[in-house]
Amino acid sequence: MSTLIAVSALGIICLILEILNLRKALIPVVILALAAILGMTIFESYLGSSIIEPDKMTMIVNTGYSYGFSCLFILLTVFIILMCPKFYQEDKVKIADYVSLKIFMLAGAIAMVSFGNLMMFFLGLEVLSIAAYVLASSRPKDKRSNEAGMKYFVMGALASSFILFGIALIYGATGSFNITEISNSSTTLVQSESLPTWFYLGFVMITIGMMFKASIVPFHFWAPDVYEGSPTLVTALMSTLVKVAAIGALFLLTTILSAAITPTYTATIVVIAILTMIVGNFTALKQNNVKRMMAFSGINHAGFMLMALLALNTSANVVLYYAAAYSLAAIAVFSVITAVCQGRDNEDLSNFYGLVKKQPLMAFCMACGLLSLGGIPVFSGFFAKFFIFDRLMNTNHLILMIIAIINSVVAVYYYLRLVNVMFIKSAENKEAIKAPVEYKFVAVAAIVLNLILGIFPSIIMNLKL
């Protein structure tokens, strides 16, 4: 509760600093405030209760799961905010607007994994989504940005309508928006074989809506165009914060509505996970635009995280660990993409030729991020996939595990393709690349944290979620 209130207040403070013409103090104030909020959230998780007295209506529920994801979200937002001054250096007069929107996105993401009431979940989802629509189209003179914003808005609105209709059906079946009452009521009704059909229908509609948000096949088609057209820093935010928030919320919702899980639903999840991995990987193989490649890479990883739904009772830590491993690697990769492609008209592969000679540190960080995404040992990406495979073994999904391993091998190919052009190819453009210190710090810090999680996976896996 206190984390959500503090983040929301920080978003308002950003706007006040703009009114008072204190733009120079904006970034330091936001970074320090987010660091303090992160410390408070970690303290609360060890304390086991909120500093602010919980509301009596249980709109927000503090659990180990919500604390874990909230800390991850705050950390990702800190990395994004650190890159804002250089990224928006040609548009400084609007930087407070851009930063406040990112803070409000953080507030929405926290609400999506901390809700105790489906209405609070939907409010968090819309706060996150509306801010993302605005940021995607934040370059009005760029046709690609306009297209990205419109596509994202139309697809997001469609997904939200599915989710809202599903929530209405769940309410009709159980008579409550409270997640505890819904869980208890649905479990009792399914045991007496009197659970209404519209409960199942509502569950399916919510699942479909969240799959849209997480860009899971066959609801993924908007992602490549939106990722490519949006400003690179916004793409980084969508690829990390938005995606893992959607996956985390989907896992939580499925746990709450688990009474609706049937063998048919399980089989459908298996098929969708397979299609998501195959479409994501084999389409990424043909991409020459790095941002589009990362879009399809994100779709592939969404397929891996989706498989955690097949072992709900034992996968909460796995979902958080995978989300952390994926997002830290992705944020490192996007920091390099931002540094290399800023001021250019495209994000083609040719921009990265010979990067090791121009920016050896950034090339090394990007290679590490890509290797982690490919599941190479030492990096946390390897253990994230290992834990998923372990859960699949325990639930007797051997064929799915084999397909996932094959897809992991395919993914390594296109990640190494990018590594190859950075280290082997000669640069077509001999012009030096000046990477801001902030971008280098974010890349190095993200890789270091990724390695720490790889060496000490117990940091997350031993949490009581």
Image (cartoon, rainbow, N blue to C red):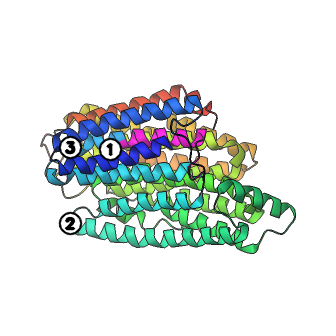
Q: Earlier in the sequence, mark 2 or mark 3?
A: 3
Q: Position of residue 79 (x, y in %)?
A: 34, 39
Q: Quadrant of residue 6?
A: top left
Q: Quadrant of residue 446?
A: top left
Q: CA gap, disc 1 to disc 2? A: 22 Å
Q: Which mark is residue 460?
A: none
Task: Please tell me whether mark 1 sits on a helix, a strand or a loop.
Answer: helix
Q: Is residue 324 above or below residue 196?
A: above
Q: CA gap, disc 1 to disc 3? A: 10 Å
Q: Earlier in the sequence, mark 1 or mark 2?
A: 1
Q: Main secondary structure of the magenta part?
A: helix
Task: Please tell me whether mark 3 sits on a helix, a strand or a loop.
Answer: helix
Circle 1: residue type: Ile
Q: CA gap, disc 2 to disc 3? A: 20 Å
Q: Which mark is residue 80?
A: 1
Which residue has dot 3 on it? 85
Within the magenta stretch, is there residue 61?
A: yes
Q: Position of residue 409 (x, y in %)?
A: 53, 46
Instruction: Sort mark 3 into few (<14), some (14-19) or many (20+) by Cα contacts within 10 Å.
Output: some
Q: Position of residue 432 (x, y in %)?
A: 13, 40
Q: Which residues are magenta?
A: 56-77
Circle 3: residue type: Pro
Left/right of residue 370 with respect to residue 390 in the rendered view: left
Camera-nearest label, 2 or 3: 3
Q: Earlier in the sequence, mark 1 or mark 3?
A: 1
Q: Is residue 246 visible?
A: yes
Which residue has dot 2 on it? 142
Q: At x 47% / y 27%, what residue is drawn? A: 452
